[in-house]
Image (tube, rainbow, N blue to C red):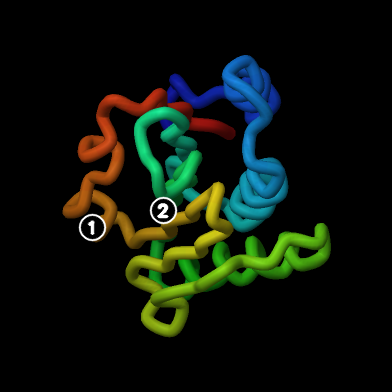
Amino acid sequence: MTLDALPFGVVWESLAAGGEPAPELSTVAEAALERNARAPTVLDLRGISDVTDFFVILTGDSDTHTRAICENILDRSREAGYRPEGVEGLREGRWVLVDFVGLVVHVFLGEVRDFYRLEGLWGDAPSYEFK
């Protein structure tokens, strides 16, 4: 986490200024923080992507850590009544993708996140690191 990371409530308010954020976003963010996800970041893709409105990008310290982050996101989301359309990569734990349609969660190992650099690929999108 960098010094620029904002409390999630502040991020939510910034996102809400552009319209109602994906309802799963708050649950996903809280669940990720409960499992100590590293460098948690939201990209606001509204108006940029036709595929989804938000990316949540997270880093785990090991494949076990990435799986634990994702499993908590899945558990907490189901408890809140949200079901993902798809989950990819959970068994390997190097890059796990959880697709809620309006929100796509990416949980990476550090070196995999550094290699794919989604934040750079979507550089036009407003980006918010949260804590």
Task: Tell me which residue sits at (36%, 32%) in the image.
Answer: 48
Task: Tell me which residue sits at (29%, 38%) in the image.
Answer: 119
**Callout 2 secondary element:** strand
Which label was assigned to residue 71? none
> In the image, is residue 63 above or below residue 61?
below
> In the image, is residue 12 above or below residue 90?
above
Residue 9 is left or right of residue 84, and the answer is right
Residue 37 is left or right of residue 80, and the answer is left
| Residue identified by numbered label 1 | 111
Which label was assigned to residue 59? 2
Q: Which part of the image, by quadrant, shows the C terminus?
A: top right
- The disc labelled 2 sits on which kind of residue? Thr
Near mark 1 (Cα within 10 A), the count class, few <14, some 14-19 or many ≥20, is: few
Residue 83 is left or right of residue 65, and the answer is right
List the single residue furthest toward the left.
115
Q: Which part of the image, by quadrant, shows the N terminus?
A: top left
The residues tagged by marks 1 and 2 sit, at their Cα atoms, a distance apart of: 9 Å
Task: Tell me which residue sits at (42%, 67%) in the image.
Answer: 96
- The disc labelled 1 sits on which kind of residue? Glu
**Callout 1 secondary element:** helix
Q: Where is residue 129? Give x, y as percent.
A: 47, 31
> In the image, is residue 35 above or below residue 51?
below
Q: Where is residue 110? Give x, y as percent.
A: 30, 55
Near mark 2 (Cα within 10 A), the count class, few <14, some 14-19 or many ≥20, is: many
Callouts 1 and 2 close, C-beta under 8 Å? no
Q: Quadrant of residue 101?
A: bottom right
Q: Quadrant of residue 74?
A: bottom right
Q: Where is residue 115? Give x, y as percent.
A: 17, 53
Q: Nearer the viewer, residue 87 or 128?
A: 87
List the single residue furthest toward the front.
50
Q: Where is residue 23? Give x, y as percent.
A: 71, 43
